[in-house]
Image: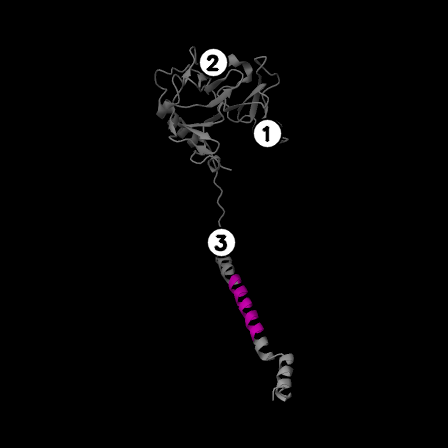
Amino acid sequence: MPISHFWRGLPGDIDAAYERHDGRFVFFKGKFWIFREANLEPGYPLELIDFGQDVPYDRIDTAIWWEPSGYTYIFQGDWYWRFNEQSRLADRGYPKPISVWGSSVPSTPKGAFLSDDGAYTFFYKGSKYWKFDNHRMKSEPGYPKSILKDFMGCSVDLDPDRDTDTDSGRKKPDVNVPPFNPDAGRDADKGREEDTNEVDVVLKVDDSEERTMNILMVTIPLVLVLCILGLIYAIINTLQSKGAPRLLVHCKRSLQTGSDPFT
């Protein structure tokens, strides 16, 4: 089901999304949208530059409200920011390299979420995911693992090497100097869309079959209506041909032949 069926007004290929501490959902795609459940908050979408200060405003790859610290973490390429939702500012000393998190975070992650108990953070990219222990602040060994096998029950990982970026995000970004500009994200998105190989499958229906179906759809209801009218006509004819009931005829004859008690 397209995401826009539930959250109306969203583009179909968002860059990132996260749930805030207050339960509202934030979506990013060149701009940002804030929803309360399935309802868009008034005044949105807004440009990324209006999201907050000292954070990238050309593109956001991943965002997550991290319950253990109470901050929102924003990822772009190989760098991340710690963002204060109250002051709308990134903390001093950021951005920092993703390598601070250890091997549990891939380069340019595509998404992140907390476990139900808040004990772990999962990062994913392509068909792989990584697990981070929030209490020990360490990566879990044995990762990455297959999303298809562990979350979807597939027996074979059909696309193990999908979405492996090379040098995107290697250079430390400067939030005060371009290329952090609103148009950069749109240009990058356009390039990604052009590089994506998609195949549109079109099923062509023969014209004669289509005409036949149209004729049947019109003819069948007409036949049913005619049958009902014929049945009603037959019932009316039957009632008219039988005439008056025998009991009424007998009573009428008795009244004609009997004596009048008042004469």
- Amino acid type for the residue under numbered disc 1: Leu
- Amino acid type for the residue under numbered disc 2: Pro
Label 3 sits on a secondary structure element that is: loop
Q: Residues within 10 Å of mark 2 (few under 14, many from 20)?
A: some
- Residue 26 percent across, percent down from the top left: 45, 27
Q: Is 222 included in the stretch rendered in magenta?
A: yes
Prevailing secondary structure class for the magenta stretch in the rendered image: helix
The answer to whether marks 1 and 3 mark residues whose Cβ atoms lie closer than 8 Å is: no
Residue in front for this viewpoint, 226 or 60: 226
Q: Residues within 10 Å of mark 1 (few under 14, many from 20)?
A: some
Residue 206: assigned label: 3
Q: Is 193 included in the stretch rendered in magenta?
A: no
Q: Residues within 10 Å of mark 3 (few under 14, many from 20)?
A: few
Label 1 sits on a secondary structure element that is: helix
Residue pointed to by mark 1: 148
Label 2 sits on a secondary structure element that is: strand
- Amino acid type for the residue under numbered disc 3: Asp
The answer to whether marks 3 and 2 mark residues whose Cβ atoms lie closer than 8 Å is: no
In the image, taking residue 231 as reference, residue 180 lies left or right, namely left
Which residue is pictured at 62% across the width and 27% down the height? 150
94 in relation to 203, above or below: above
- Which quadrant of the figure contains the C terminus? bottom right
Residue 97: assigned label: 2
Magenta region, residue range: 220-236
73 in relation to 202, above or below: above
